[in-house]
Amino acid sequence: MRGLTQRIEVTLDTLLESVDLAEDITLRVAEIVGFDEEQRYRIGMSVREAVINAYEYGNVHDRSRHIYLFFELLSAELVIRVRDQGAGFRLEDVPDPLSEENLLKTSGRGLFLIRAFMDQLEVTYAPAGGAEVIMTKRLPPAQSQPSVGASEG
Amino acid sequence: MNLRATQRDLGDTTVVDISGRITLGEGSALLRTMVRQLLETGRRYIVLNLADVSYIDSSGIGELVSSFTAVKKEGGELKLLHLTKKVHDLLLITKLFTVFDVHNDEEKAIASFSR
């Protein structure tokens, strides 16, 4: 079992502004962890897309719901989870945006981008309801696990 | 940085110089409004100059696709000019490079319209 070293939890309101906020927090965390600029961009974009999904399709703009953002720094990877309070969904039910019939659709590329930019993507039904998007990125080589937050897991 | 867009009319072609981020919210909305207004005024040959677009997310990509189809529906053409590396890479991995006509030279982009 991997050792959990550090963890940050952020609760976001279901607002458009939360999308930028989540990305900003992620970029800061990724910088502290030691990812280079290109990887920070990819990780930030992935969280942005997951939060857009939570805002638009999970919580359907309902301001009484929240979006939960978790960062866990493990020995060899950074795990980021975005949880909403919607109905949940299965990754295998999401249409392939690269297929001919979907190429000119104006939406449906967010999860595809996360899969392209992160090392691992998983979607589960959260225990309390809603979808939980779990993204994993391997730490850069020779990473010394710097502190990313105050709370210990 | 918020999205900014200014337009230049060169004959029957309009070049839209865009700078900033094309993302969910204001950025995507501004692009949508601008392209729709151009179509309403009869401008159907449009070049989007993305040289100063620093960032684009899936909503921004969706808005580019929406603009492309809206212009095509009106019998016009929409072309992309001066993609940054980030935007170039996004269009590649989403296979949209095969959809858009992308140029690195403004004069050639303008000359490429099949009027």
Image (spheres, coloured by chain):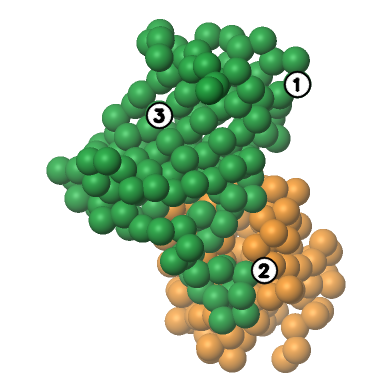
Q: How many marks?
A: 3
Amino acid type of the residue tagged 3 in the rendering:
Phe
Instruction: Decide: few, some or many residues near mark 1? Use Cα within 10 Å; few <14, some 14-19, many ≥20.
Output: few
Residue at image coords 61%, 75%: A99
**Quadrant in the rendering for residue B18:** bottom right
Above or below, comparing residue A97 to residue A15 in the picture: below
Q: Secondary structure at mark 3?
A: strand
Amino acid type of the residue tagged 1 in the rendering:
Pro
Residue at image coords 67%, 34%: A39
Query: How many angstroms separate mark 2 from mark 1 (CA)?
Result: 33 Å
Output the letter for the chain in orange.
B
Instruction: Tell which of A99 and B30 is nearer to you.
Output: A99
The residue identified by callout 3 is A70
**Which colour is chain A painted?**
green
Mark 1 / mark 3, whichever is N-terminal: 3
Residue B108: % across, % down: 84, 72
The residue identified by callout 1 is A141
Above or below, comparing residue A139 to residue B32 in the picture: above
Query: How many angstroms separate mark 1 from mark 3 (CA)?
Result: 23 Å
Query: The disc numbered 1 marks a residue on which chain?
Result: A
**Quadrant in the rendering for residue A37:** top right
The residue identified by callout 2 is B96
Amino acid type of the residue tagged 2 in the rendering:
Leu
Residue A139 visible to the viewer: yes
Indicate which label's residue lies in the foreground, 2 or 3: 3
Query: The disc numbered 2 marks a residue on which chain?
Result: B
Residue at image coords 69%, 48%: B86
Circle number at residue B21: none
Q: Secondary structure at mark 1?
A: loop
Residue B49: % across, % down: 68, 60
Label 2 in the same subunit as label 1: no
